């Protein structure tokens, strides 16, 4: 998922949580929004980690630098949202409510890591192996063709 989509989803959830707090709702009244926000924060962290160590076939495309800048911008926005949300929650519901949000975020991150990120890693490994095998076959074919033409030119075939 691209950083723009991630931060957009986080912003929608953040605004909904903020309005809920202003209306006097508790965190337990907004589980979907909390889960969406925590999931977006987890996805952003995952995107940042992947941008630091992209697979070789993504590094070739040249999109890595642009994505890194988008992630940096999204991360700064996420830090602002986190700070504002922390002050909102701590002020209106007390520090224990913030601790509850942090626990929820950790649970979502763990669940995503076990399910979604693992599937993503498997897909990436399949693509990497497939592209590696194709590159190897092309290299062997090119080498064989070169040897054949060199041998044909020398009259050995």
Image: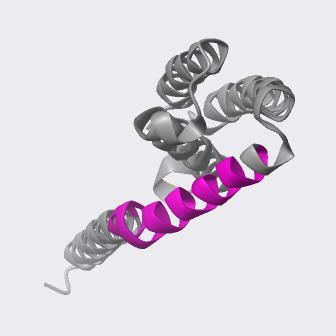
Magenta-colored segment: predominant secondary structure: helix
Counting from the top left corner in percent of width and height, residue 15 is at 58, 15
Q: Which residues are magenta?
A: 98-120
Residue 30 horizontal side relative to residue 66, left or right: left
Residue at 55% across, 36% down:
37
**Considering only vertical position in the picture, is 12 above or below 41?**
above
Identity of the residue drawn at 22% across and 76% down:
148
Point out the image quarter for the C terminus.
bottom left
> From where the camera sits, is residue 17 visible?
yes
Seen from this angle, which residue lies furthest left?
Answer: 157
| Above or below for 29 versus 35 | above
- Find residue 4 and report its image quarter: top right
Q: Nearer the viewer, residue 7 or 129?
A: 7
Which image quarter holds the N terminus? top left
Q: Residue at x 56, y 33 (%)?
A: 63
Q: Is residue 55 visible?
A: no
Front position in the image: 50 or 10: 10
Q: Is residue 111 magenta?
A: yes
Left/right placement of residue 128 relative to residue 130 reads right
- The picture places residue 150, in percent across and down from the top left corner, at 30, 73
């Amino acid at each position: 998922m691209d950083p723009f989509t991630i931060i957009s989803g986080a912003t929608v959830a953040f605004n909904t949580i903020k309005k809920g707090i202003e209306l006097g709702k508790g965190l337990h009244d907004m589980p979907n929004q909390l889960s969406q926000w925590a999931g977006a924060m987890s996805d952003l962290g995952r995107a940042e980690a992947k941008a630091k160590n992209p697979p070789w076939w993504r590094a070739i495309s040249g999109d890595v630098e642009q994505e890194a800048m988008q992630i940096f911008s999204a991360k700064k926005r996420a830090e602002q949202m986190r700070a504002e949300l922390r002050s909102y929650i701590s002020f209106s519901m007390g520090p224990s409510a913030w601790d509850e949000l942090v626990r929820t975020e950790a649970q979502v991150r763990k669940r995503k890591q076990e399910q979604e990120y693992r599937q993503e890693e498997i897909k990436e490994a399949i693509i990497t192996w497939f592209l590696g095998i194709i590159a190897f076959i092309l290299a062997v074919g090119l080498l064989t063709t070169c040897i054949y033409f060199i041998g044909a030119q020398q009259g050995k075939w």
